[in-house]
Amino acid sequence: MGSTGTRRHGDKAAAIAEAAARLRAGEIVAFPTETVYGLGALATDGQAVAKVFEAKGRPSFNPLIVHVADLAAAEALAVFDAEARALAGRFWPGPLTLVLPLREGHGLSPLATAGLDTVGLRVPAHPVARALLAAVGGPVAAPSANRSGRLSPTRLDHVTSGLGDALGGAVEGGACAVGVESAILRTRPLALLREGGLPAEEIEAVLGRPLPRDLTPGRVQAPGQLSSHYAPGLPVRLNVTERAPDALLIGFGPVAGDLTLSASGDLREAAAALFDTLHRADALARERGRARLDVAPIPEVGLGRAIVDRLTRAAAPRNG
């Protein structure tokens, strides 16, 4: 694995401390949970989160599950109602992800939430994951530690054979006890979004009623579901190199705009800035009386493919 700093059977505390330091420094680190191994980045650092998409070859910026140390850390990021708090009290730590409304001032990177006003939160049960989160002292965004479309990893060897030198570090934690991803539950309105390592019947027993399912792919509402387009309020046109009087131009590289994704043409910087820039551009265009958002060409290599994927969805014809 090159210089990733993996420790398999040595000093576990030292390995966790090293991994936490790497995460705080903006690197990506693989770590075990009870479900599968996760590929983590500090969830408040957009460029670190961009490295996760880059390493996975993830085809679009789907929202990521944000892992936290405990319920108090979760409540600092999202708004819990009584039902969500009851579910967290019963099943955390454990294989349940709750999709909840973001709290004002949450501080998470928009790339981690895919620009949504909700976030998927989980408190993992694996002792290594819990120790790592405590050492980091902040939220860690972590999808499964595998290349997109490949089998999810339940042993560290699965991670290293698939991701190798893309990792900034990794922590050994043995085989994952659950072995399938967490169940994902949205609270408002209530619905199961993904079947997973916690049986739906156990959730229903706490709720005292049947659990509605919303397993339809094609929506950006949770990790584990394919994404539809993220659409600003104004129409979007791609591959524009010159300003038009009726549009606000989002630049990239040599194409200077009213706003820019990256003046230097850095795709990682552009990925980290994408959702926030679209939000700001939409508001600024309205303020200036512009009718459209134009976006400079983005090279379709590496992270550029994911950026173009999301922009293409934003520019797609609207339904209704």
Image (spheres, rainbow, N blue to C red):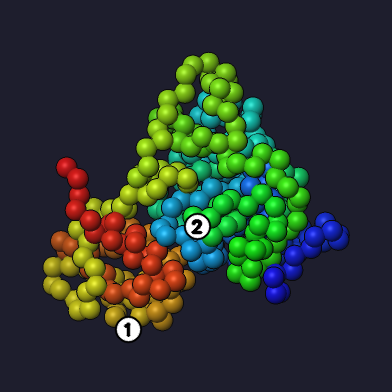
> For this rendering, which residue is in front, 256 or 164?
164
Image quadrant where residue 309 sits: bottom left
* Mark 2 crowd level (few <14, some 14–19, many ≥20, 10 Å Cα): some
Q: Is mark 1 on a helix, strand or loop?
A: loop
Q: Label 2: which residue?
A: 148
Give the position of the N terminus as an image quadrant: bottom right
Q: In which quarter of the image is the C terminus?
A: top left
Q: Which residue is drawn at 70% across and 45% down?
A: 176
* Crowd class of label 1 (few under 14; some 14 to 19; many from 20; radius 10 Å): few
Please name the amino acid that badge 1 sits on: Pro
Q: Which residue is pictured at 40% across the width and 79% down the height?
A: 265
Q: Which residue is drawn at 54% across and 65% down?
A: 55
Q: Which quadrant of the structure image shows residue 287?
A: bottom left
The earlier-in-sequence mark between 2 and 1 is: 2
Left or right of 114, for residue 166: right
Q: Mark 1 points at which residue?
A: 254
